[in-house]
Amino acid sequence: MAEGIVDVTSITWNSEVLKAEGLVMVNFWAEWCKPCVIISSTVEDLAKEYAGKVKVVRLDIDDNADIASTYKIRSIPTIMFFKHGQKLEEIFYAVPKMQLKVTIESLLIGN
């Protein structure tokens, strides 16, 4: 597990994401996915930068296919943002850190 990031599974999904307080950023990934590896350091940086403001978790889609199917994950990495159990935003592929920061900031202000 990367610093500041919680690994979630099908078993812990409800408690760690849907019932969590505040904004939750979920990184859907897989070990074999090169773009997932590329964005992992960005996600870790954001977890440190927004510690106490945003909960950052990751879910391995190979080990938790039921959750990936529920949220219709068709490509990875996919980043989703949740609050009070509701999906607020979704970002596909390895995007620049600034794009993720803009999304986080707007969600923190708007919700």
Image: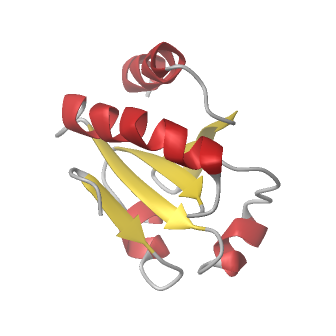
Which residue is pictured at 40% across the width and 32% down the height?
42
Which x, y percent locates residue 109?
Answer: 38, 18
- Answer above or below: position of 66 versus 99: below
Q: Nearer the viewer, residue 106 or 80?
A: 80
Q: Residue lying farthest left?
A: 52
- Answer above or below: position of 15 versus 79: below
- Answer above or below: position of 56 versus 30: above
Which x, y percent locates residue 41?
Answer: 38, 38
User: Could you tell whether 19 is left or right of 26 in the image?
Assistant: left
Q: Quadrant of the C terminus?
A: top left
Which residue is pictured at 69% across the width and 36% down the height?
93
Q: Which of 62 and 16 is in front in this view?
A: 62
Which residue is pictured at 21% across the width and 36% down the height?
48
Residue 24 visible in rendering: yes
Q: How many labels does the image show?
A: 0
User: Could you tell whether 33 is left or right of 48 in the image?
Assistant: right
